[in-house]
Image (cartoon, helix red, strand yellow):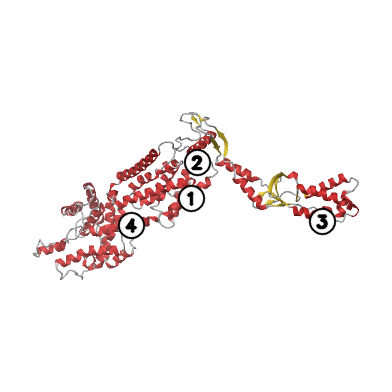
């Protein structure tokens, strides 16, 4: 949360200053823009000043060679030659020609050089030192002044004195490179000064680039040194109030979108955890590396929410999750808009591009959305372009991080005992080993489960239920039947009569046992507990009616019927109720002979009424309106799948 005062003015280049005239409260430097600093760096780097090391050894060698040189008739000149040669070499001698091009540093300057002598470096105009040819000419000129009667050209040519003059300034590439780097990097960040009590901008004045630069500089200095001067207790109290209001807003967003979330503590704790992670990441990044805020993979938090919650919950919560950006970061509005739009787009695209290599296509779309927002704000702000490429790299890496961090949902599943949409999609794949085993051992049951899955899908969408969860529950609710498949009529052939010779109690117990066997299989194959709950509740505490009626018709004791009832529990969620009703209707519909509109109406109404009268729906979180919608959808669905076909007329004269 904020710990210091903030510069509470909003402004844009090209707009007018809407506030009172702003007077500086303190002295502050005017900061250069990134473009200005970069231009100065480029200018400093255009001409590379070469460094040369002054070599005393070369001078000594040349002097020794001259002293041993045979000047013939001119040996009397030797002391003067040595003295004048020392004067020339004292300034320094460079090789002939222009400075060479350094392959890595570029063109070396031919105007200024730097000479290192006695561990000190000093700059000189190039004209203050000699080239080799200039040194020879200077030496001849000096000697000619002292001995005008001597033909110096003849002396130099016959004695070989010209060939002895060599450069004593040796190019030092290491120092040249170091100096060039320093001259390019160490550019003054300021350009002028504003004194206290000076006017910065007047009310109604157009904010030009120069005024905006002063405002930016004042804002930076204000936020840096103008600390909070009120009671510290009020500062902390304000931070606490802000935090509590954000948590309250999170609570309100969930309550208004789907209050059922509060019935599951793990889901609400997960929401708080995701929100705290996002807020902490924003806070730490803003304090430690505010220039890297574009790197934040905020859209991945939208995916973390979508993995466990309905869409109507995700977007409001995601907006609340982004609010700390507006508090912590000075560039919060741009980041808020950027991550809001990219997160919303990701929620849509990830459903279709969330598998395999398509995730990288999703990252490309995410990068494109954030790039458009970034460019939009740059064009509006007429901002600097010098460091755009750094921000664009951050946005690109952030898009890739969104894909890279998504698998953490599997860790969250374990930590909070939740089931993600991705996990549900995997479980609903009919190539799943457990489903393949059921299709092989109990093919009739498997077909029944597929039919129920289609029914709950249609019903679930009509009442805004959790359709992915419903589909999985429908596929697995009868997996216990494959432990004893012939016990159930849908898996029997005409020659098989499993229940022949068994008492009604024994048959009922064999039927009822499929729930217990299904739960055991779910635990063995580590199915989510929410899926196992469908297995436990899809019959509630109802009776195995066929064998109960058989028992009572045979004179059985009405007070001793506990063996014919399922152990339950009764369904408690809307999804469990839908599965119970669809399971019963799909099974019973196979005994129906008529599927007219009236017949389907009577059939569905009687089935649902029977469940209500038996008290199977009394613990369920489903409204009367939703129950009516369920019945309406099922009536239409039955008419569609059991539609009548016309008889094809025979062709006259045909034998078939």
Where's residue 130, x and y in %? 77, 47
Element at badge 2?
helix
Circle nearer the N terminus (2, 4): 2
Residue 134 visible in image: no
In the rendering, which numbered label is found on residue 22? none
Q: Secondary structure at mark 3?
A: helix
Where is 200 relative to 536, above or below? above
Q: 10 Å neighbourhood of mark 3: few (<14), some, or many (≥20)? A: some
Residue 436 placed where, x, y %?
Answer: 32, 65
Q: Which residue is mark 2?
A: 378
Q: Nearer the viewer, mark 1 or mark 3?
A: 3
Q: Quadrant of the N terminus?
A: top left
SS for callout 1: helix
**Quadrant in the picture for residue 590:** bottom left
In this orientation, which residue lies closer to the viewer: 325 or 244?
244
Residue, disc 3: 65
**Residue displayed at 86% across by 44% down:** 145
Q: Earlier in the sequence, mark 4 or mark 1?
A: 1
* Residue 628 makes an appearance in the image: yes
Measured in 3D between alpha carbons, the distance from the residue under mark 1 to the one under mark 2, in whole angstroms, is 17 Å
Locate residue 243, reporting x and y percent: 36, 43
Name the residue beneath numbered marker 1: 396
Q: Nearer the viewer, residue 439 or 184?
A: 184
Q: Which residue is mark 4?
A: 424
What whole-number distance in Å separates the C-alpha atoms at marks 1 and 3? 67 Å
Q: Could you tell me how far apart the alpha carbons at marks 3 and 4 are, in whole angstroms?
A: 93 Å
Disc nearest the viewer among 3 and 2: 3
Q: Which residue is drawn at the image coordinates 45% and 47% (left, top)?
A: 285
Name the residue at the left extreme. 555
């Amino acid at each position: 949360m904020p710990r210091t005062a903030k510069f509470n003015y909003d402004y844009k280049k090209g707009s007018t200053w809407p506030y009172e005239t702003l007077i500086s409260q303190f002295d502050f430097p005017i900061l250069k823009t990134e473009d200005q600093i970069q231009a100065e760096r480029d200018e400093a780097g255009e001409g590379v000043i070469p460094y040369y090391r002054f070599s005393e050894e070369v001078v000594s060698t040349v002097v020794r060679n001259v002293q041993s040189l045979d000047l013939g008739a001119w040996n009397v000149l030797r002391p003067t030659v040595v003295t004048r040669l020392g004067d020339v070499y004292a300034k320094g001698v460079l090789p002939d020609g222009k400075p060479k091009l350094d392959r890595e540093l570029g063109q070396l300057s031919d105007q200024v050089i730097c000479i290192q002598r006695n561990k000190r470096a000093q700059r000189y105009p190039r004209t203050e030192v000699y080239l080799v040819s200039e040194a020879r000419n200077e030496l001849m000129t000096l000697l000619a002044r002292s001995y005008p009667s001597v033909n110096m050209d003849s002396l130099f040519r016959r004695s070989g004195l010209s060939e002895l003059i060599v450069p004593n300034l040796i190019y030092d590439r290491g120092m040249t490179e170091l100096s060039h780097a320093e001259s390019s990097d160490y550019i003054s960040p300021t350009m002028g000064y504003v004194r206290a009590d000076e006017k910065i901008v007047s009310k109604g004045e157009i904010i030009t680039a120069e005024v905006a630069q002063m405002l930016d500089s004042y804002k930076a200095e204000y936020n840096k040194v103008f600390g909070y001067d009120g009671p510290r207790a009020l500062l902390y109290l304000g931070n606490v109030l802000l935090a509590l209001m954000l948590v309250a807003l999170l609570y309100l967003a969930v309550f208004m979108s789907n209050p059922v979330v509060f019935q599951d503590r793990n889901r609400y704790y997960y929401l708080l955890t995701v929100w705290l992670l996002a807020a902490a990441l924003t806070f730490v990044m803003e304090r430690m590396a505010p220039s890297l805020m574009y790197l934040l993979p905020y859209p991945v938090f939208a995916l973390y929410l979508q993995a466990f919650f309905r869409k109507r919950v995700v977007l409001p919560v995601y907006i609340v999750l982004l609010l700390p950006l507006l508090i912590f970061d000075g560039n919060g509005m741009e980041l808020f808009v950027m991550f809001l739009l990219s997160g919303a787009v990701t929620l849509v695209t990830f459903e279709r591009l969330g598998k395999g290599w398509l995730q990288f296509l999703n990252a490309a779309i995410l990068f494109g959305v954030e790039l458009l927002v970034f460019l939009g704000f740059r064009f509006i702000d007429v901002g600097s372009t010098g460091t755009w490429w750094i921000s664009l790299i951050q946005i690109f890496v952030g898009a890739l991080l969104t894909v890279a961090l998504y698998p953490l949902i599997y860790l969250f599943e374990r930590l909070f005992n939740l089931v993600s949409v991705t996990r549900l999609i995997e479980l609903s794949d009919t190539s799943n080993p457990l489903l393949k085993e059921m299709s092989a051992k109990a093919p009739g049951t498997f077909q029944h489960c597929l039919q129920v899955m289609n029914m709950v899908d249609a019903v679930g969408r009509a009442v805004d239920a959790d359709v992915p969860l419903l589909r999985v529950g429908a596929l697995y609710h009868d997996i216990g039947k494959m432990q004893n498949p012939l016990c159930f009529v849908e898996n029997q052939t005409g020659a098989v009569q499993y229940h022949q010779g068994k008492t009604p109690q024994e048959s009922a117990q064999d039927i009822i046992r499929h729930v217990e066997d299904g739960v055991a299989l779910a635990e063995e194959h580590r199915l989510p507990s929410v899926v196992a709950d469908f297995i436990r509740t899809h019959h509630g505490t109802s009776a195995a009616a066929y064998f109960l009626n058989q028992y009572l018709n045979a004179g059985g004791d009405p007070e001793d019927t506990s063996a014919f009832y399922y152990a339950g529990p009764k369904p408690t969620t809307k999804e469990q109720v839908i599965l119970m009703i669809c399971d019963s209707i799909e099974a019973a519909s196979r005994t129906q002979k008529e599927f007219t509109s009236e017949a389907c109406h009577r059939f569905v109404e009687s089935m649902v009424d029977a469940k209500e009268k038996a008290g199977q729906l009394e613990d369920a979180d489903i409204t009367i309106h939703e129950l009516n919608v369920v019945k309406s959808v099922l009536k239409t669905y039955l008419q569609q799948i059991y539609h009548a076909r016309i008889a094809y007329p025979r062709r006259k004269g045909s034998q078939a």
